[in-house]
Amino acid sequence: MSDALFRASLRLAARGAGAALALTGALVLAGCGSHAAVPESPRNAIVAHPQPADAINAEVYSGDVRARFESQLGFRVNGKIKTRKLDVGNHVDAGQVIAELDPVDLQLQVGSAGANLAAAKAARDLAQADFDRYQALLAKNYISRTQVDAQANALKAAQAQVQQAQAAFAVAQNQAEYTSLRADHAGVITALNAEAGQVVAAGQTIATLARDGAAEVEIAVPENRISAYKVGTPFAIESWADAGKRLGGHLREIGPEADRITRTYRVRISFDDSTQAPRFGQTARVYFAEGAAAGQTLIPLSALHELAGKPAVWVVDAKTRQVKLAPVTVASYREQGITLSGGVGMQDWIVTAGVHKLREGEAIAPIDALNRPLAL
Protein backbone atom coordinates (compact mmCIF):
# COMPACT_ATOMS: atom_id res chain seq x y z
CA MET A 1 0.00 0.00 0.00
CA SER A 2 1.32 3.41 -0.90
CA ASP A 3 1.95 6.11 1.67
CA ALA A 4 -0.81 8.33 0.26
CA LEU A 5 -3.37 5.55 0.49
CA PHE A 6 -2.35 4.72 4.09
CA ARG A 7 -2.75 8.30 5.24
CA ALA A 8 -6.18 8.57 3.66
CA SER A 9 -7.32 5.44 5.51
CA LEU A 10 -6.18 6.93 8.84
CA ARG A 11 -8.13 10.10 8.20
CA LEU A 12 -11.31 8.16 7.49
CA ALA A 13 -10.92 6.08 10.68
CA ALA A 14 -10.40 9.19 12.82
CA ARG A 15 -13.48 10.79 11.36
CA GLY A 16 -15.54 7.69 12.12
CA ALA A 17 -14.34 7.53 15.73
CA GLY A 18 -15.16 11.21 16.25
CA ALA A 19 -18.64 10.73 14.88
CA ALA A 20 -19.21 7.72 17.10
CA LEU A 21 -18.01 9.61 20.15
CA ALA A 22 -20.27 12.53 19.35
CA LEU A 23 -23.20 10.18 18.91
CA THR A 24 -22.48 8.46 22.22
CA GLY A 25 -22.27 11.81 24.02
CA ALA A 26 -25.57 12.90 22.53
CA LEU A 27 -27.22 9.70 23.65
CA VAL A 28 -25.85 10.08 27.17
CA LEU A 29 -27.03 13.67 27.42
CA ALA A 30 -30.43 12.66 26.12
CA GLY A 31 -30.65 9.91 28.70
CA CYS A 32 -29.69 12.27 31.54
CA GLY A 33 -32.22 14.82 30.44
CA SER A 34 -34.99 12.26 30.72
CA HIS A 35 -34.70 11.99 34.59
CA ALA A 36 -36.49 14.54 36.90
CA ALA A 37 -34.36 16.85 39.09
CA VAL A 38 -33.88 15.55 42.71
CA PRO A 39 -35.59 17.98 45.15
CA GLU A 40 -33.58 19.49 48.01
CA SER A 41 -34.40 18.29 51.55
CA PRO A 42 -35.68 20.98 53.98
CA ARG A 43 -32.95 22.83 55.80
CA ASN A 44 -32.75 22.35 59.61
CA ALA A 45 -33.42 25.59 61.48
CA ILE A 46 -33.56 26.34 65.20
CA VAL A 47 -36.89 27.90 66.14
CA ALA A 48 -38.40 29.18 69.40
CA HIS A 49 -41.15 31.34 70.82
CA PRO A 50 -40.39 34.94 71.84
CA GLN A 51 -40.28 35.31 75.63
CA PRO A 52 -41.86 37.95 77.89
CA ALA A 53 -39.49 40.87 78.24
CA ASP A 54 -40.50 41.69 81.79
CA ALA A 55 -37.99 39.16 83.13
CA ILE A 56 -35.05 41.43 82.22
CA ASN A 57 -36.86 44.70 82.96
CA ALA A 58 -38.07 43.45 86.33
CA GLU A 59 -36.64 43.83 89.79
CA VAL A 60 -36.16 40.35 91.16
CA TYR A 61 -36.19 39.37 94.84
CA SER A 62 -35.60 35.98 96.37
CA GLY A 63 -37.61 34.69 99.30
CA ASP A 64 -39.23 31.61 100.78
CA VAL A 65 -42.82 30.42 100.82
CA ARG A 66 -44.58 30.72 104.18
CA ALA A 67 -48.07 30.47 105.56
CA ARG A 68 -49.82 33.74 106.17
CA PHE A 69 -50.65 32.60 109.71
CA GLU A 70 -48.05 30.78 111.80
CA SER A 71 -48.68 29.79 115.44
CA GLN A 72 -46.00 29.25 118.07
CA LEU A 73 -47.53 26.53 120.24
CA GLY A 74 -46.53 25.81 123.83
CA PHE A 75 -47.87 24.26 127.02
CA ARG A 76 -49.77 26.49 129.44
CA VAL A 77 -48.22 24.78 132.47
CA ASN A 78 -44.79 23.64 133.56
CA GLY A 79 -43.88 19.99 133.29
CA LYS A 80 -41.87 17.17 131.77
CA ILE A 81 -42.74 16.04 128.25
CA LYS A 82 -43.95 12.45 128.34
CA THR A 83 -44.57 11.80 124.64
CA ARG A 84 -44.32 13.61 121.30
CA LYS A 85 -46.94 12.45 118.82
CA LEU A 86 -45.84 14.12 115.58
CA ASP A 87 -42.81 14.96 113.46
CA VAL A 88 -41.89 17.99 111.38
CA GLY A 89 -43.87 18.02 108.15
CA ASN A 90 -46.88 16.16 109.52
CA HIS A 91 -50.31 17.59 108.78
CA VAL A 92 -52.61 18.03 111.78
CA ASP A 93 -56.30 18.67 112.23
CA ALA A 94 -57.73 21.19 114.65
CA GLY A 95 -57.65 19.71 118.17
CA GLN A 96 -55.15 16.93 117.35
CA VAL A 97 -52.63 16.16 120.11
CA ILE A 98 -49.04 17.19 119.35
CA ALA A 99 -47.32 16.35 122.67
CA GLU A 100 -48.22 15.43 126.26
CA LEU A 101 -46.77 16.24 129.67
CA ASP A 102 -46.41 13.81 132.58
CA PRO A 103 -49.75 14.38 134.40
CA VAL A 104 -48.88 12.98 137.85
CA ASP A 105 -48.10 16.27 139.60
CA LEU A 106 -51.09 18.02 138.14
CA GLN A 107 -53.37 15.16 139.08
CA LEU A 108 -52.12 15.47 142.66
CA GLN A 109 -52.92 19.17 142.57
CA VAL A 110 -56.44 18.32 141.42
CA GLY A 111 -56.79 15.93 144.38
CA SER A 112 -55.51 18.55 146.80
CA ALA A 113 -57.89 21.18 145.43
CA GLY A 114 -60.78 18.72 145.67
CA ALA A 115 -59.97 17.99 149.30
CA ASN A 116 -59.85 21.70 150.11
CA LEU A 117 -63.24 22.13 148.45
CA ALA A 118 -64.73 19.31 150.52
CA ALA A 119 -63.35 20.86 153.72
CA ALA A 120 -64.76 24.26 152.81
CA LYS A 121 -68.17 22.77 152.14
CA ALA A 122 -68.12 20.99 155.50
CA ALA A 123 -67.22 24.23 157.27
CA ARG A 124 -70.01 26.02 155.43
CA ASP A 125 -72.55 23.34 156.39
CA LEU A 126 -71.49 23.62 160.05
CA ALA A 127 -71.77 27.40 159.94
CA GLN A 128 -75.22 27.07 158.36
CA ALA A 129 -76.38 24.71 161.13
CA ASP A 130 -75.05 27.04 163.84
CA PHE A 131 -76.79 30.00 162.24
CA ASP A 132 -80.11 28.14 162.06
CA ARG A 133 -79.81 27.15 165.73
CA TYR A 134 -79.00 30.71 166.78
CA GLN A 135 -82.02 31.93 164.83
CA ALA A 136 -84.26 29.56 166.80
CA LEU A 137 -82.77 30.69 170.12
CA LEU A 138 -83.24 34.33 169.15
CA ALA A 139 -86.91 33.68 168.48
CA LYS A 140 -87.24 32.52 172.13
CA ASN A 141 -85.14 35.47 173.34
CA TYR A 142 -82.48 33.14 174.77
CA ILE A 143 -79.65 35.01 173.00
CA SER A 144 -79.00 38.51 171.81
CA ARG A 145 -79.16 39.86 168.26
CA THR A 146 -75.40 40.49 168.38
CA GLN A 147 -74.67 36.79 168.68
CA VAL A 148 -76.90 36.01 165.74
CA ASP A 149 -75.21 38.66 163.61
CA ALA A 150 -71.79 37.21 164.45
CA GLN A 151 -72.95 33.80 163.39
CA ALA A 152 -74.36 35.20 160.15
CA ASN A 153 -70.96 36.70 159.35
CA ALA A 154 -69.28 33.37 160.06
CA LEU A 155 -71.70 31.70 157.61
CA LYS A 156 -70.88 34.25 154.90
CA ALA A 157 -67.16 33.66 155.41
CA ALA A 158 -67.67 29.91 155.12
CA GLN A 159 -69.65 30.35 151.89
CA ALA A 160 -66.90 32.56 150.44
CA GLN A 161 -64.30 29.92 151.28
CA VAL A 162 -66.40 27.38 149.39
CA GLN A 163 -66.45 29.63 146.32
CA GLN A 164 -62.69 30.11 146.59
CA ALA A 165 -62.13 26.38 146.88
CA GLN A 166 -64.40 25.74 143.89
CA ALA A 167 -62.41 28.20 141.76
CA ALA A 168 -59.10 26.60 142.84
CA PHE A 169 -60.48 23.17 142.02
CA ALA A 170 -61.59 24.34 138.55
CA VAL A 171 -58.13 25.83 137.88
CA ALA A 172 -56.47 22.59 138.93
CA GLN A 173 -58.77 20.61 136.62
CA ASN A 174 -58.00 22.94 133.71
CA GLN A 175 -54.27 22.66 134.34
CA ALA A 176 -54.59 18.91 134.35
CA GLU A 177 -56.15 19.14 130.89
CA TYR A 178 -53.30 21.42 129.71
CA THR A 179 -50.97 18.44 129.81
CA SER A 180 -52.03 17.80 126.18
CA LEU A 181 -50.71 20.26 123.59
CA ARG A 182 -53.27 20.44 120.80
CA ALA A 183 -53.30 22.15 117.41
CA ASP A 184 -55.54 25.21 117.45
CA HIS A 185 -56.07 25.03 113.66
CA ALA A 186 -55.51 22.59 110.82
CA GLY A 187 -52.08 22.96 109.28
CA VAL A 188 -48.54 21.62 108.94
CA ILE A 189 -45.92 21.30 111.68
CA THR A 190 -42.91 23.28 110.43
CA ALA A 191 -40.69 23.13 113.55
CA LEU A 192 -40.36 21.20 116.81
CA ASN A 193 -38.25 22.61 119.63
CA ALA A 194 -38.56 19.94 122.34
CA GLU A 195 -38.28 16.20 122.78
CA ALA A 196 -39.71 13.60 125.16
CA GLY A 197 -38.09 13.77 128.59
CA GLN A 198 -37.40 17.51 128.40
CA VAL A 199 -38.64 19.76 131.20
CA VAL A 200 -40.34 22.83 129.78
CA ALA A 201 -41.77 26.03 131.19
CA ALA A 202 -45.22 27.41 130.62
CA GLY A 203 -45.36 29.35 127.34
CA GLN A 204 -42.12 27.88 125.95
CA THR A 205 -42.43 27.25 122.20
CA ILE A 206 -42.73 23.53 121.52
CA ALA A 207 -43.98 23.49 117.91
CA THR A 208 -44.59 25.90 115.04
CA LEU A 209 -47.82 25.39 113.10
CA ALA A 210 -48.34 26.80 109.60
CA ARG A 211 -52.07 27.05 109.09
CA ASP A 212 -53.78 25.74 105.99
CA GLY A 213 -55.03 28.35 103.56
CA ALA A 214 -53.35 31.57 102.50
CA ALA A 215 -49.69 31.28 101.44
CA GLU A 216 -47.17 34.07 100.96
CA VAL A 217 -43.58 34.75 99.97
CA GLU A 218 -41.47 36.79 102.37
CA ILE A 219 -38.78 38.92 100.74
CA ALA A 220 -36.33 41.58 101.92
CA VAL A 221 -36.44 44.93 100.08
CA PRO A 222 -33.56 47.43 100.47
CA GLU A 223 -34.36 50.78 102.01
CA ASN A 224 -33.61 52.69 98.79
CA ARG A 225 -36.38 50.78 96.93
CA ILE A 226 -39.07 50.36 99.58
CA SER A 227 -40.73 53.66 98.65
CA ALA A 228 -41.49 52.31 95.15
CA TYR A 229 -43.88 49.68 96.49
CA LYS A 230 -47.32 50.05 97.97
CA VAL A 231 -49.79 47.60 99.44
CA GLY A 232 -51.67 45.96 96.56
CA THR A 233 -48.80 46.29 94.04
CA PRO A 234 -48.96 43.31 91.61
CA PHE A 235 -46.05 40.89 91.42
CA ALA A 236 -45.20 37.69 89.55
CA ILE A 237 -43.98 34.73 91.61
CA GLU A 238 -41.84 31.89 90.25
CA SER A 239 -40.86 28.81 92.24
CA TRP A 240 -37.20 27.83 91.94
CA ALA A 241 -38.29 24.19 91.71
CA ASP A 242 -40.73 24.95 88.86
CA ALA A 243 -38.84 27.53 86.81
CA GLY A 244 -40.80 29.09 83.98
CA LYS A 245 -44.19 28.84 85.66
CA ARG A 246 -45.21 32.21 87.04
CA LEU A 247 -48.09 32.81 89.41
CA GLY A 248 -49.86 36.05 90.18
CA GLY A 249 -49.51 37.78 93.51
CA HIS A 250 -49.81 41.13 95.23
CA LEU A 251 -48.07 42.95 98.03
CA ARG A 252 -49.99 42.46 101.28
CA GLU A 253 -47.74 43.78 104.02
CA ILE A 254 -44.67 46.02 104.43
CA GLY A 255 -42.70 45.83 107.64
CA PRO A 256 -42.75 49.13 109.56
CA GLU A 257 -39.07 49.01 110.53
CA ALA A 258 -35.87 48.05 108.69
CA ASP A 259 -33.73 45.21 109.99
CA ARG A 260 -30.96 46.61 112.20
CA ILE A 261 -28.26 44.52 110.49
CA THR A 262 -29.28 44.13 106.83
CA ARG A 263 -31.14 47.47 106.59
CA THR A 264 -33.90 45.79 104.58
CA TYR A 265 -37.64 45.81 105.07
CA ARG A 266 -39.65 42.62 105.47
CA VAL A 267 -42.29 42.44 102.71
CA ARG A 268 -44.98 39.80 102.28
CA ILE A 269 -46.33 38.89 98.81
CA SER A 270 -49.60 36.93 98.80
CA PHE A 271 -50.52 34.42 96.09
CA ASP A 272 -53.68 35.31 94.19
CA ASP A 273 -54.50 31.59 94.08
CA SER A 274 -53.12 29.79 97.14
CA THR A 275 -54.10 26.39 95.74
CA GLN A 276 -51.26 26.70 93.20
CA ALA A 277 -48.69 27.93 95.71
CA PRO A 278 -45.49 25.87 96.21
CA ARG A 279 -44.89 23.96 99.40
CA PHE A 280 -43.95 25.84 102.55
CA GLY A 281 -40.24 26.52 102.81
CA GLN A 282 -39.52 26.37 99.08
CA THR A 283 -37.49 29.11 97.45
CA ALA A 284 -39.31 31.52 95.16
CA ARG A 285 -38.40 34.52 93.01
CA VAL A 286 -40.61 37.58 93.03
CA TYR A 287 -40.69 39.80 89.91
CA PHE A 288 -41.88 43.38 89.70
CA ALA A 289 -41.92 44.91 86.20
CA GLU A 290 -42.43 48.53 85.29
CA GLY A 291 -45.54 49.33 83.27
CA ALA A 292 -43.49 50.27 80.20
CA ALA A 293 -42.34 46.66 79.80
CA ALA A 294 -45.84 45.24 79.71
CA GLY A 295 -46.53 43.42 76.45
CA GLN A 296 -42.94 43.51 75.18
CA THR A 297 -41.18 40.36 73.99
CA LEU A 298 -37.58 39.19 74.12
CA ILE A 299 -35.78 37.44 71.22
CA PRO A 300 -32.13 36.34 70.84
CA LEU A 301 -29.72 38.69 69.06
CA SER A 302 -29.12 35.97 66.45
CA ALA A 303 -32.80 36.03 65.41
CA LEU A 304 -32.76 39.58 64.06
CA HIS A 305 -32.60 40.04 60.26
CA GLU A 306 -33.56 42.94 57.98
CA LEU A 307 -36.24 43.71 55.41
CA ALA A 308 -35.75 46.73 53.18
CA GLY A 309 -33.20 48.07 55.65
CA LYS A 310 -35.51 47.70 58.67
CA PRO A 311 -35.48 45.09 61.48
CA ALA A 312 -37.31 41.85 60.74
CA VAL A 313 -37.45 38.22 61.84
CA TRP A 314 -38.22 34.97 60.06
CA VAL A 315 -41.65 33.72 61.17
CA VAL A 316 -42.47 30.05 60.58
CA ASP A 317 -45.91 28.97 59.40
CA ALA A 318 -46.89 26.14 61.74
CA LYS A 319 -48.81 24.28 58.98
CA THR A 320 -46.58 24.61 55.94
CA ARG A 321 -43.31 25.18 57.84
CA GLN A 322 -42.42 27.90 55.37
CA VAL A 323 -40.63 31.01 56.56
CA LYS A 324 -41.65 34.59 55.95
CA LEU A 325 -39.92 37.82 56.92
CA ALA A 326 -42.00 39.91 59.32
CA PRO A 327 -41.02 43.49 60.26
CA VAL A 328 -40.62 44.16 63.97
CA THR A 329 -40.26 47.21 66.20
CA VAL A 330 -37.17 47.15 68.39
CA ALA A 331 -37.61 48.65 71.85
CA SER A 332 -34.08 48.15 73.17
CA TYR A 333 -30.90 46.12 72.79
CA ARG A 334 -29.71 44.26 75.87
CA GLU A 335 -27.15 41.63 76.80
CA GLN A 336 -29.88 39.04 77.16
CA GLY A 337 -31.34 39.79 73.72
CA ILE A 338 -33.53 42.27 71.88
CA THR A 339 -36.79 43.55 73.32
CA LEU A 340 -39.56 44.11 70.79
CA SER A 341 -42.58 46.32 71.25
CA GLY A 342 -44.41 44.93 68.21
CA GLY A 343 -44.30 42.67 65.18
CA VAL A 344 -44.47 39.19 66.73
CA GLY A 345 -46.28 37.61 69.64
CA MET A 346 -45.27 35.01 72.20
CA GLN A 347 -47.28 32.36 70.31
CA ASP A 348 -45.32 32.82 67.07
CA TRP A 349 -42.47 30.54 66.04
CA ILE A 350 -39.37 32.42 64.87
CA VAL A 351 -36.01 31.26 63.52
CA THR A 352 -33.29 32.05 66.06
CA ALA A 353 -30.10 31.03 64.20
CA GLY A 354 -28.77 31.08 60.61
CA VAL A 355 -31.26 33.71 59.48
CA HIS A 356 -28.98 34.98 56.68
CA LYS A 357 -29.16 31.61 54.87
CA LEU A 358 -32.94 31.48 54.45
CA ARG A 359 -35.10 32.51 51.51
CA GLU A 360 -38.63 33.84 51.44
CA GLY A 361 -41.12 30.94 51.32
CA GLU A 362 -38.48 28.29 51.98
CA ALA A 363 -39.67 25.22 53.89
CA ILE A 364 -37.56 24.25 56.90
CA ALA A 365 -37.25 21.35 59.34
CA PRO A 366 -37.76 23.00 62.76
CA ILE A 367 -35.53 21.87 65.65
CA ASP A 368 -34.93 23.17 69.15
CA ALA A 369 -31.67 24.38 70.67
CA LEU A 370 -30.72 20.76 71.46
CA ASN A 371 -31.20 19.67 67.83
CA ARG A 372 -34.41 17.80 68.60
CA PRO A 373 -37.21 17.87 65.99
CA LEU A 374 -40.20 20.03 66.89
CA ALA A 375 -43.85 19.51 66.04
CA LEU A 376 -45.22 23.00 65.54
Image (cartoon, helix red, strand yellow):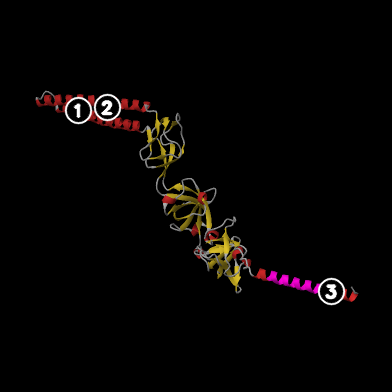
Callout 3: SS: helix
Q: Which of marks 2 and 3 is in front?
A: 3
Q: Is residue 20 magenta?
A: yes
The residue positioned farthest toward the right in the image shown: 2
Up-down: is 209 above or below 328? above
Mark 2 or mark 3, earlier in chain: 3
Mark 2: which amino acid?
Leu
Residue tagged by mark 3? 9
The residue positioned farthest toward the front in the image shown: 1
Pinpoint residue 197: horizontal percent, then vertical percent. 45, 28
Q: Which of 26 and 117 is in front in this view?
A: 26
What segment is highlighted magenta in the picture? 10-29
User: Is residue 222 among the parts visible in the rendering?
Assistant: no
Q: Nearer the viewer, mark 1 or mark 3?
A: 3
Identify the disc placed on residue 117: 2
Q: Which of marks 2 and 1 is in front?
A: 2
Callout 1: SS: helix
Instruction: Give the residue drawn at x 81%, y 74%.
Output: 12
Residue tagged by mark 1? 150
Mark 1: which amino acid?
Ala
Up-down: is 25 above or below 141? below
Instruction: Give the residue drawn at x 46%, y 32%.
Output: 195
Pinpoint residue 116: horizontal percent, then vertical percent. 29, 26
Q: Distance between the residues labelled 2 and 1?
A: 24 Å
Q: Please give left or right for residue 213 compared with residue 63 in the image.
A: left
Q: Does the magenta stretch include residue 357?
A: no
